[in-house]
Image (spheres, rainbow, N blue to C red):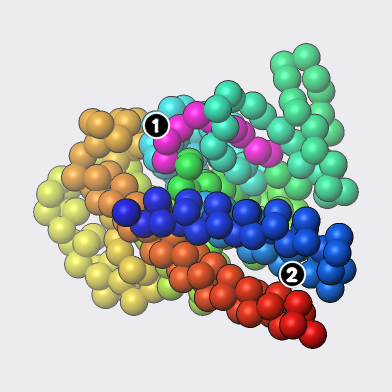
Amino acid sequence: MDLEAKLRFAVQNLIEAERALRKAASAHPALEGSSRAFGRMARAANRPLRLGILGESNSGKSSLANLLVGVATLPALPVANTRLPTLLTYAPAPFVMALYETGERITLSASLAAQQSAMKRLEVGLPASILRSVEILDFPGSANVLLPVTRQDPAGYGIDAAIWTTVATQAWRESERTHWLALPEAVRSRSVLAVTFCDVIGGGESDLKRLQARLEQSARPHFREICYVGAGDAGAAAAAPGEQALFAQVRSLAREFASRRLEKATAIARRLADHALEKLGG
């Protein structure tokens, strides 16, 4: 049984335990708390990795998100850069939804106007297979002075890992390092630096090698891997080696996250079961 199958099996066991305890709670009210705890654990174990894509304005974040998903879903032109954090999540049928600061959620359509100033983020549902294990959260540029600071702060969006995008022709500036080091260490420890637009470096292979040597010294200590990608126009099937390396890193992050969820779900389920048995014995 592979990792994802084990995780699905564990989640199903948690759901069944929740149902059984909810039923038993009618005769033993002390089990109600354990029932809710199993339900919360099942939902936590079943959620995908949330991968934030961060970087300064026009650094290729939306192009990178489109590359990973395999379809152009986000605005990728300099004149239409993302103005709100946008979450790409799995859905059998496409949808676009606005999430407001109040918690209200409204499904958007071409005929429905929305008040952008009060939105916290957008959610886009897509039937893309990668989104079953990885949610992708595309953030506005960290240097976008048109946006409120709270809209640019990833800390309140629950990301588990991150890709920082930096343009090859001016990669890893001091302003980027400052923004990066302000993130929680738990996120930075599960991160990749994506050097974008490598296909437009003027000096060709020699300039790319010099860039790689510089980033190995200045950026490597802050990331688990550095991937060198193009403009982000190719899909996964036609990806160049740099893009393939990026896909491999994302898959690795998703596997590690699933493994941690499985270990945590198993350990907590045992403690909850022991607690429920104590309640029955008491």
What x and y, as percent, mark residue 51? 50, 54
At horizontal 86% and vertical 60% (from top left) the residue drawn is 26
User: Which is more N-terminal, label 1 or label 2?
Assistant: 2
Magenta segment range? 122-130
Q: Which residue is mark 1?
A: 70
Residue 113 found in image quarter: top right
Between 85 and 12, the residue placed more toward the observer is 12
Q: Which amino acid type is marked by label 2?
A: Ser
Q: Which residue is mark 2?
A: 34
Query: Which mark lies nearer to you, 2 or 1?
Result: 2
Secondary structure category for the residue under label 2: helix
At horizontal 75% and vertical 36% (from top left) the residue drawn is 98
At horizontal 65% and vertical 38% (from top left) the residue drawn is 123
Tell whether 274 sits left or right of 194.
right
Residue 256 versus residue 2 in the image, above or below? below
Task: Say how many tags the image has.
Answer: 2
What x and y, as percent, mark residue 75? 54, 31
| Residue 176 appears in the rendering | no
Tell whether 89 sits left or right of 224.
right
| Residue 15 appears in the rendering | yes
Secondary structure category for the residue under label 1: loop
Residue 25 found in image quarter: bottom right
At horizontal 67% and vertical 64% (from top left) the residue drawn is 38
* Mark 1 residue crowding within 10 angstroms, few (<14) / some (14–19) / many (20+): some
Q: Which amino acid type is marked by label 1?
A: Gly
Q: Can you say which quadrant of the picture contains the C terminus?
A: bottom right
Residue 27: give its label.
Answer: none
Residue 282 versus residue 163 in the image, above or below? below
